[in-house]
Structures are given as structure tokens and as C-alpha cells.
Image (cartoon, rainbow, N blue to C red):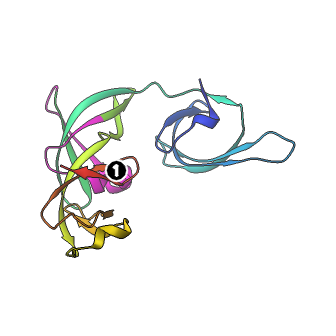
């Protein structure tokens, strides 16, 4: 059982004996009362999205997920293909099922397949991925005084803010949970 205050985007829980993925979580505190946790849940089996409000302190069961190592192969535009490393089975996910993870997928990236009752329901990315900067503004001497950064486009199309000293063609480490620049690779 997991407390609803600890729910995070992307977690899979059981609600009314059905597996749901948490799409969004908002916590609301009321004066002189218990807080509310408003969630948006998507049924993994049917695709139904529903808004559910819990009282803070409520507990929900976490889905019994297993993980399977896989490697990202390619995308044909509509689907993303992965190969399980234990038996070389190919598994395809639609762009909707992959969601924002598509911005971090590079060829041969190893991920974990999320398995529920022997069915693949999604992927879990590593916390950090290395991506190449394909487009960014040139830096000028003295730019570092103000701190901050400049926009950059990475090889997957992801747009992030990088420090002024990062140039086009360099490899950078990106946190897949927040989408932020960490350091040069």
C-alpha cells in the first residue's frame, strides 16, 4: 500500500481492482481540514482517463509490476520498437503509450519494460541519458558572468537550456525525470 501523498506521475496503482497509470497529481491543502490529492488516472487495459480525488492519508495498492531488460531499436513514426534482451522478442508501443519518453530514446538505449501479468504496459528510462547537441547559439566571451543559459536542440528534438559554454556537436547528460541539463558527457 502506498500513501496518496507519495503518488508521482507515471506510477501504476490498483484502483477499484483495475491497473491505472498516474497521469497527473495535484495536492490541495484546506484550512482547518485534511488536504486533498487530485489525480488523473488512465486505465491501462481500456485507456479510460478519469479524475479521482483522494483525502490525504488515504492508501492505495501499488500494482505488482515486474521489469524486463530491453533495448530500443527504432521508430517508424507511429510505433516505437524494443527488443527484450532475454529472448529477443520485439515489442511495439504507440507514441501515445511512450509519451514524453520519446524525447530521450536513442538507438540501442537500454530500458526496462514494465510488465503487468506478462503483458508489456510501458517503459522505464534510465535516470540519465547522453544526447548530442545539434543546434544552439554560439557563445561569446563574457557571457558566463550573468549565469543562466541558452536554448539548445538535442538529436531527438528535445529543447532544453544549457550553459553558455556548451557548443553544437557536444554530448550532454540529461535527467530524464526533469528534462534538465546535468553536465557535459
Percent x, y for residue 74?
16, 52
Q: In the rendered structure, which segment of residues is drawn in magenta?
A: 86-112
Q: Residue at x 58, y 35 (%)?
A: 6
Q: Could you say which is closer to the camera, residue 185 or residue 154? A: 185
Q: Residue at x 17, y 49 (%)?
A: 185
Q: Residue at x 71, y 31 (%)?
A: 57
Is 110 contained in the magenta span? Answer: yes
Compared across the picture, whether 126 is left or right of 3 comes to left
Percent x, y for residue 100?
37, 55
User: How many marks are shown on the rendered structure?
Assistant: 1
For this orientation, the residue located farthest to the right is 32
Residue 123, picture quadrant: top left
Q: Could you say which is closer to the camera, residue 36 or residue 81? A: 36
Label 1 secondary element: helix
Q: Residue at x 30, y 67 (%)?
A: 144
Q: Which residue is mark 1?
A: 98
If the image is split into quadrants, where does the N terminus sit? top right
Q: Is residue 144 visible?
A: yes
Compared across the picture, whether 116 is left or right of 22 comes to left
Percent x, y for residue 86?
16, 25
Q: Could you say which is closer to the camera, residue 168 or residue 177? A: 168
Residue 144 vertical placement versus 63 (above, below): below
Percent x, y for residue 121?
37, 38
Residue 3, picture quadrant: top right
Residue 167 vertical placement versus 70 (above, below): below
Is 54 contained in the magenta span? Answer: no
Amino acid at each position: 500500500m502506498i500513501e496518496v501523498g507519495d503518488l508521482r506521475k507515471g506510477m501504476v496503482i490498483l484502483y477499484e481492482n483495475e491497473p491505472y497509470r498516474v497521469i497527473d497529481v495535484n495536492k490541495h491543502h484546506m484550512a482547518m481540514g485534511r488536504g486533498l490529492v487530485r489525480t488523473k488516472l488512465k486505465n491501462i487495459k481500456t485507456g479510460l482517463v478519469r479524475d479521482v480525488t483522494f483525502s490525504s492519508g488515504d492508501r492505495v495498492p501499488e500494482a505488482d509490476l515486474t521489469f524486463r531488460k530491453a533495448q530500443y531499436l527504432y521508430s517508424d513514426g507511429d510505433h516505437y520498437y524494443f527488443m527484450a534482451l532475454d529472448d529477443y522478442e520485439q515489442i511495439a508501443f504507440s507514441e501515445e503509450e511512450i509519451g514524453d519518453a520519446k524525447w530521450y530514446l536513442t538507438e540501442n538505449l537500454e530500458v526496462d519494460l514494465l510488465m503487468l501479468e506478462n503483458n508489456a504496459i510501458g517503459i522505464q528510462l534510465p535516470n540519465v541519458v547522453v544526447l548530442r547537441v545539434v543546434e544552439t547559439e554560439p557563445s561569446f566571451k563574457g557571457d558566463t558572468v550573468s549565469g543562466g543559459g541558452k536554448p539548445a536542440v538535442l538529436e531527438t528534438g528535445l529543447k532544453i537550456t544549457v550553459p553558455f559554454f556548451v557548443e553544437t556537436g557536444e554530448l550532454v547528460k540529461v535527467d530524464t525525470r526533469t528534462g534538465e541539463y546535468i553536465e557535459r558527457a
